[in-house]
Amino acid sequence: MQKKSQLLEFERLPAAEVEKFISALRQADDWNLFRINPFSFAGEHAISPDIAIDLFIHAARIGLVDFNYNMICPRCGGVARSHHELDAVEATDFYCALCTASTPTTLDDQVEVSFAINPSVHKVSLNPPESLESYNRYHFSANYVISPELAALRKKLIRHLLVVAPGKAKRIHLSKGRYRSFQLVSIETNTSITV
């Protein structure tokens, strides 16, 4: 693999760690090649966290992985937006449609840096609307530590996932029952409406 040879050219990267790194990436499924946290990766593959950071940064330099700057909602842990360039990050605030709230952009607290395999190396094929579980895995940051109470609230409030193809329509029947309002959220456009 040409990318492996390029990584081995960086003197500060130990060859054994490069081997482990490349082997782990080759064996990873698509979900594990998307929004990779270098610290979690280091722990899972017995690599020093400092070396893992160096591996990912050098891998980004050679086009093996890409940087992602994810705007994390502090209320729900959802990825409201994701950017490949730091200068694309919202300057003042960003909006979370799920929470219907704006959050000031603070790099230390609300911007998560993650990595994803470069599409020229491997085309990640994820289908978030496939199921509610896939949607939750896609939308919510795995790095956002949530309380058991928030996990229970998410499960209670996020009830259904409905996929509407472009140019198509679907009819939704809402029964009041014990609920006073319903929120419909578009994950594609980060917009919502409350009925």
Image (spheres, helix red, strand yellow):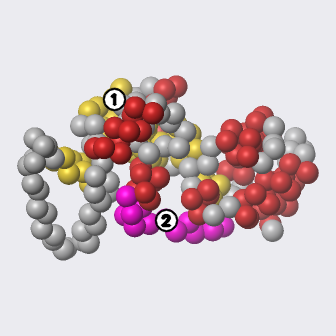
Q: Which residues are magenta?
A: 121-132
Picture quadrant where residue 153 is located: top left
Residue 108 is left or right of residue 8, and the answer is left
Q: Quadrant of the N terminus?
A: bottom right
* Residue designated by label 1: 103
Disc 1 residue type (three-letter): Thr
Residue 64 spot, x, y in % from top left:
69, 58
> Toward the viewer: 42 or 11?
42
> Looking at the picture, how far across and down is residue 23, in whole percent?
80, 60
Q: Which mark is residue 168?
A: none
* Residue 168 drawn in magenta: no
Report the number of discs: 2
Disc 2 designates what residue?
A: 126
Please report whichever mark, 1 or 2, sits nearer to the chain's N-terminal start: 1
Identify the residue at horizontal 20%, vertical 51% (top origin): 184
Find the distance from the CA under tag 1 to the CA under tag 2: 28 Å
The answer to whether residue 111 is left or right of residue 54 is: left
* Element assignment for label 1: strand
Crowd band around label 2 with a 10 angstrom C-alpha radius: few (<14), some (14–19), many (20+) = few
- x%, y% of residue 22? 78, 58
Q: Does dot 2 land on a helix, a strand or a loop?
A: loop
At x 81%, y 44%, the residue is: 46
Q: Position of residue 3 (x, y in %)?
A: 77, 62
Give whichever of 5, 103 is nearer the camera.
103
